[in-house]
Image: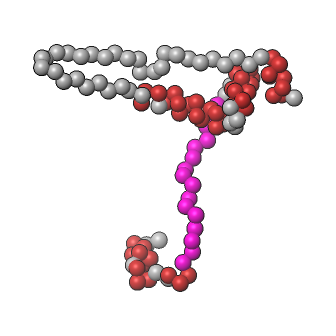
């Protein structure tokens, strides 16, 4: 549309209040990502998602966001005192504890049947 046409539409005097339509807001833009898993790994992820009552895609998204935002848990220290000094804190950027969920063959069979 031309700039003149835009100006005409933006002018409040040209608005048609009697025929106004109520619309739902647009959904936020999304991106779909394809992730390849070996079959055994996928079955393990799918079973864990099922146990937590989540869809597999939701489980993967939450896990990825948890990992991506893990560094946000930074602790802030403040210190005031009568003498000058240095205070250094060293901490790993990523968590050092990993959780591994093992799925038994029986669990795998219950998902596939």
Magenta residues, start to end: 20-35
Residue 21 lies in the magenta stretch: yes
Asked where in the image residue 33 lies, by quadrant, the reply is top right
- Residue 62 vs residue 106: left or right? left
Residue 110: x and y in percent read: 84, 26
Asked if 13 appears above or below 30 in the picture, the reply is below
Residue 71 seen in render: yes
The quarter of the rendered structure image containing the C terminus is top right
Asked if 49 appears above or below 84 in the picture, the reply is below
Asked where in the image residue 82 lies, by quadrant, the reply is top left
Going 62% across and 32% down the picture, which residue do you hit?
60
Residue 42 seen in render: no
Going 31% across and 17% down the picture, which residue do you hit?
89
Going 58% across and 30% down the picture, which residue do you hit?
63
- Residue 28 vs residue 111: left or right? left
Residue 54: x and y in percent read: 68, 36
Viewer-closest of 8 and 71: 71
Asked if 90 appears above or below 7 in the picture, the reply is above
Going 22% across and 23% down the picture, which residue do you hit?
79
Viewer-closest of 30 and 2: 30
Viewer-closest of 20 and 84: 84
The prevailing secondary structure element of the residues shown in magenta is loop
Give the image's coloring scheme.
secondary structure
């Amino acid at each position: 549309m031309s700039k003149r046409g835009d100006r005409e539409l933006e002018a409040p005097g040209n608005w048609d209040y009697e025929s106004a339509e109520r619309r739902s807001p647009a959904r936020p833009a999304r991106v779909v990502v394809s992730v390849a898993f070996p079959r055994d790994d996928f079955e393990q992820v799918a079973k864990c998602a099922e146990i937590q009552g989540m869809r597999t895609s939701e489980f993967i998204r939450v896990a990825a966001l948890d990992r991506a935002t893990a560094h946000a848990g930074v602790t802030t220290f403040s210190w005031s005192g009568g003498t000058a000094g240095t205070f250094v804190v060293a901490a790993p950027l990523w968590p050092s504890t990993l959780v591994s969920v093992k799925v038994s063959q029986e669990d795998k069979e219950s998902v596939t049947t």
